[in-house]
């Protein structure tokens, strides 16, 4: 039987990844990557999406005449999958009402399906990663934000308005920190890289000793830059390896809140398994070690004891693989 290929595009807060995926094995046969942080407007996002998708297709060098099973775009924001429109993306410079499905579909000559980035990654994990064969799966991804998605019997449980599983906006602290969505005390305001960065930069400005100063300087980053600078997950990992007190303390806090959010999700959904992924989790496995026991302990005893909490197996590729599955199956 001829192999089936799909094109998946994963649009995150810092980069666009596109990959041509062998849909039977999950293998990435071609890929391309572009940064998103310099992008200012919707038109540029649309153009760069198309460029990245075409570059991945060129990289795959598929035999002439190979038809793709579909194109999927998984994007860090709220989407309308019916209309193929990105409604709102606070982590992408506030892009609104972008007709990604139509625009990319015209450029590639193929139908395009849209999902949010975590829904895409969750489909990848359930098909080829840490969630294979799991009946009730919750995927939680910690990166620029904290996202979640529910997969029931292999299919996305999207909810009434395609936002089911948004664990980043569970309230973990009454009247707590403001969240990027405008709400207060949400998990994302405590456990995302954005939140962790904010705390660390504030502590550095207060004069707390930390190896972060040297690490940021080596990367050419300015801790006093207006609007703050992003502390990449790799820098956090280096500081953890050096047992930096400030970074460890901040990550312990983030892990505690992540555990609380997961405990609420366990009580509410009673999943068989939770897959934890995303840039921060991958760079700092300590977060899983902190959050998982906390979640099991804080949850009701029966669902807490039953749930398995594991790390993502697909890593950075989960998004493109899942987006390709989304494009091929809807
Ligand atoms: Zn929120």
Image: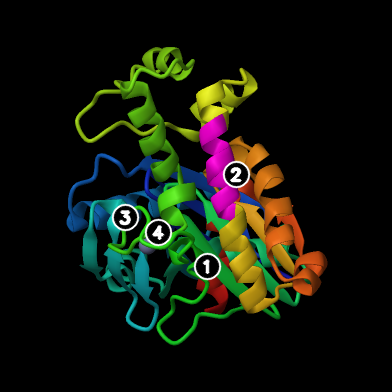
The local secondary structure at tag 4 comes to: loop
Nearer mark to the viewer, of 2 and 4: 4
Q: Is disc 2 placed on a helix, strand or loop?
A: helix
Query: Could you tell which of marks 1 and 4 lies nearer the N-terminus?
Result: 1
Asked if residue 113 shows in the view, the reply is: yes
CA–CA distance in space, label 1 to label 4: 23 Å
Q: Residue furthest front?
A: 174
Q: Compute the Cα span from label 3 to label 2.
A: 23 Å
In the drawing, what numbered circle is on residue 318? none
Residue at image mark 4: 185
Task: Using the numbered discs, state the Cα–Cα distance from disc 2 to disc 4 in whole angstroms.
Answer: 21 Å
Q: Say whether disc 3 or disc 2 marks the residue closer to the N-terminus.
A: 3
User: What is the C-alpha distance between the residues marked 1 and 2?
Assistant: 17 Å
Asked if the residue under mark 1 is in contact with the one under mark 3, i.e. CB atoms within 8 Å, the reply is no
**Image height of 136 relative to 311, above or below:** below
Of badges 1 and 2, nearer the viewer stands: 2
- What secondary structure predominates along the stretch shown in magenta? helix
Q: Secondary structure at mark 3?
A: loop
The verdict on residue 252 being magenta is yes
Residue receiving disc 1:
119
Residue at which label 2 appears:
281
User: Disc 3 to disc 1, how far (Cα)?
Assistant: 25 Å
What's drawn in magenta, residue-wise?
A: 249-258
- Residue identified by numbered label 3: 178
C-beta proximity under 8 Å, tags 4 and 3? no
């Amino acid at each position: 039987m001829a192999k089936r290929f799909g094109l998946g595009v994963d649009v995150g807060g810092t980069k666009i990844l596109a990959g041509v995926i062998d849909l039977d094995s999950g293998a990435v046969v071609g890929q391309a990557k572009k940064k998103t942080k310099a992008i200012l407007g919707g038109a540029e996002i649309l153009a760069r999406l198309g460029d990245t998708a075409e570059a991945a297709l060129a990289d795959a060098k598929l035999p002439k005449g190979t038809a793709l099973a579909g194109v999927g775009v998984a994007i860090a924001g709220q989407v309308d999958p019916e209309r193929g429109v990105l409604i709102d993306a606070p982590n992408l410079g506030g892009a609104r009402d972008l007709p990604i499905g139509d625009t990319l579909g015209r450029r590639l000559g193929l139908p395009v399906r849209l999902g949010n980035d975590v829904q895409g990654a969750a489909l990848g994990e359930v098909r080829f990663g840490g969630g294979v064969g799991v009946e009730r799966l919750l995927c939680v991804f910690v990166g620029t934000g904290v996202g979640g998605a529910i997969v029931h019997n292999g299919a996305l449980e999207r909810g009434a308005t395609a936002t089911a599983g948004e664990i980043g906006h569970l309230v973990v602290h009454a009247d707590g920190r403001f969240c990027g969505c405008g709400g207060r005390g949400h998990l994302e305001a405590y456990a995302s890289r954005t939140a962790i960065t904010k705390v660390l930069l504030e502590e550095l400005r207060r004069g707390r000793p930390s190896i972060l100063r040297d690490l940021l300087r080596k990367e050419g980053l300015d801790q006093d830059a207006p609007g703050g600078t992003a502390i990449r997950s790799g820098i956090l990992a280096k500081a953890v390896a050096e047992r930096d007190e400030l970074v460890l303390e901040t990550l312990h806090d983030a892990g505690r809140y992540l555990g609380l959010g997961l405990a609420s999700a366990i009580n509410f959904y009673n999943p068989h398994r939770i897959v934890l992924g995303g840039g921060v989790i991958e760079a700092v496995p300590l977060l899983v070690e902190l959050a998982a026991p906390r979640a099991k302990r804080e949850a009701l005893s029966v669902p807490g004891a039953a749930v398995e909490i594991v790390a993502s197996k697909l890593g950075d590729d989960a998004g493109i693989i899942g987006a390709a599955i989304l494009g091929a199956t809807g």
